[in-house]
């Protein structure tokens, strides 16, 4: 069996970092968008819609981050399986 390239061994860490980055980026984008669209007169009636939009953006950012972290975990497990199989073949 051949050895894995170093970039493949670093992929789980890259996916974990991307998950955190995408989470923060998505939340930041949503909050900036809401701040730009906010009613300058402080209409109380829009507070519920604003809270809903914030909740939806938090949910979406969490889903995207979880997907990235799960991909990193799967790659991590596959690398461990590869290492174990390679050790058994030698």
Image (cartoon, helix red, strand yellow):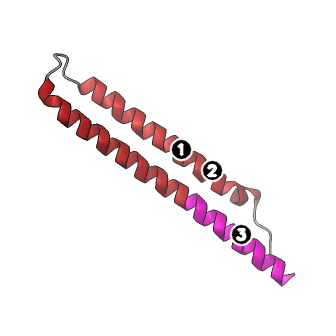
Q: Label 2: few (<14), some or many (≥20) within 10 Å?
A: some
Quarter location, residue 27: top left
Taking the magenta stretch, the answer to whether it contains residue 52 is: no
Q: Label 3: few (<14), some or many (≥20) within 10 Å?
A: few
Disc 1 versus disc 2: distance between alpha carbons? Answer: 10 Å
User: Of label 3 and label 1, which has the lower sequence position?
Assistant: 1
In the rendering, which numbered label is found on residue 20?
1
User: Of discs 1 and 2, which sits in the foreground?
Assistant: 1
Q: Left or right? Give the position of 14 relative to 84.
A: left
**Looking at the image, which residue sits at the far right?**
90
Q: Is residue 12 above or below residue 40?
A: below
- Tell me whether circle 3 and circle 1 mark residues in contact (CB < 8 Å): no
Q: Is residue 57 above or below residue 82?
A: above
Q: Residue at x 30, y 42 (%)?
A: 55
Where does residue 76 sit, x and y in percent of width and height?
A: 65, 63
Q: Is residue 88 above or below residue 37?
A: below
Disc 3 versus disc 2: distance between alpha carbons? Answer: 17 Å
In the rendering, which numbered label is found on residue 80?
3
Where does residue 10 sit, x and y in percent of width and height?
A: 70, 54
User: Of label 3 and label 2, which has the lower sequence position?
Assistant: 2
Quarter location, residue 86: bottom right
Q: Left or right? Give the position of 50 relative to 14.
A: left
Reading the image, the residue beneath label 2 is: 14
Q: Left or right? Give the position of 83 relative to 21.
A: right
Taking the magenta stretch, the answer to whether it contains residue 81 is: yes
The span shown in magenta is 71-90
Q: Is residue 8 above or below residue 34?
A: below
Magenta segment's dominant SS is helix
Q: Left or right? Give the position of 46 relative to 69.
A: left
Disc 3 versus disc 1: distance between alpha carbons? Answer: 23 Å
Q: Label 1: few (<14), some or many (≥20) within 10 Å?
A: some
Q: Residue at x 76, y 66 (%)?
A: 4
């Amino acid at each position: 069996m051949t050895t894995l390239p170093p970039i493949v061994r670093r992929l789980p860490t890259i996916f974990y970092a991307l998950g955190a980055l995408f989470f923060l980026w998505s939340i930041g984008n949503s909050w900036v968008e809401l701040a730009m669209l906010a009613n300058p007169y402080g209409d109380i009636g829009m507070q519920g819609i604003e809270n809903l939009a914030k909740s939806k953006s938090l949910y979406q950012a969490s889903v995207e981050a979880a997907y990235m972290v799960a991909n990193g975990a799967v790659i991590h497990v596959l690398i461990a399986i590869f290492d174990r199989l390679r050790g058994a073949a030698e």
